[in-house]
Amino acid sequence: MKKMIVLAIGAMMLVACGQKGPKAEEVKIAQKTDSLNRIIQQKDNEINDMVSTINDIEEGFRAINQAQNRVTVAQQGEGANAVERIRENIQIIQQTMQHNRELINKMRNQLRQSSVASDELRRTLDNLTRQMEEKDAQMRQLRAELEAKDVRIGELDKEVTNLNTNVSSLKEESSQKSQTISVQDKQLNTAWFVYGTKKELKEQRIIVDGKVLQSNFNRDYFTKIDIRVDKEIRLYSRSAQLLTSHPQASYTLDRDANKQYVLRITNPQLFWSTSKYLVVLVK
């Protein structure tokens, strides 16, 4: 009986030992798996971060290329607008290149500190660095071209300014001449007339001692007209006599419905050729 109890206790101990062994092994495997997952996750994060940096750098190069193309197009233009477009795009290029330099340095530090030893990433970094150096060389060449372009634009602007000044002077001179011609034309086509009784004309010194317009007569008493427009003068009288000399073939004296005279000038140039003053005596 005692022997059987000892055997039973021994069997129970063997079973207990068999159950404890697999649990410890599983814990170790789980720990190793978790550690590997963390390492893989870290490497994935590092790779994703560097890939994102590469994408940003390449996007920067695309923006630089587009700005360079716009500068090339603007260089073919002239004037202040073209210069302003060139300056704006040069500023974009400079800012983007500076940002790309910072991103390349960031990626270089990432590779240096990263646990990922990737030859492909290093080759990519070397390629991006070469592209950056090429862009620097292109910018130096572009600056040299723009310096020459700025000189030429400056000369053209000076020529344009001089031309504008000359045009302004010519316009002013032309305007003055036109104004002078207009004044002269107006003077040439201006005449004055007056009609009145003998008493009225004497009072205004238009008739003095039987003579017409011989002394200092009152010019304000006359009505000014444009001989090109005013070709008919109503005299409001049944008696009318021209006291100033005008060719008879250049006018008619007609009566209206009220039997009052109307002077109709049929040939203005001829009528006013002898005198620009018309005096008509009415009753």
Image (spheres, helix red, strand yellow):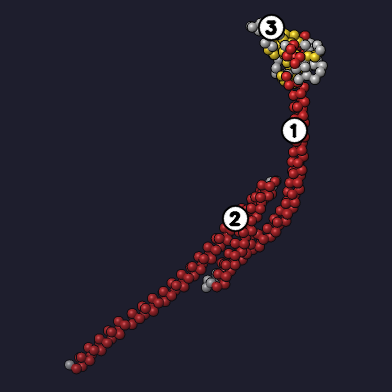
User: What residue appears at the point 52 percent right and 73 percent down from the top-left corner?
Assistant: 115
Q: Amino acid at mark 2?
A: Ala
Binning the other alpha carbons within 10 Å of mark 1 as few (below 14), some (14 to 19) or many (20 upward) gives few
The amino acid sitting under disc 1 is Ser
Q: Are marks 3 and 1 in contact (CB under 8 Å)?
A: no
**Mark 1 touching mark 2, by CB under 8 A?**
no
Return the x and y of residue 252 as percentages of the image width and height: 73, 8
Residue 191 relative to residue 119: left or right: right
Can residue 266 be seen at all in this image of the molecule?
Answer: no
* Residue at 76% from the left image edge and 48% from the top image edge: 155
User: Of 8 and 205, which appears nearest the observer?
Assistant: 205
Which quadrant, please, contains the C terminus?
top right
Q: What kind of residue is marked 3?
A: Arg
Q: Which residue is mark 1?
A: 175
Which residue is tagged 3? 238
Q: Which residue is mark 2?
A: 63
Q: Residue furthest bottom?
A: 2
Q: Nearer the viewer, residue 175 or 204?
A: 204
Identity of the residue drawn at 76% across and 10% down: 242
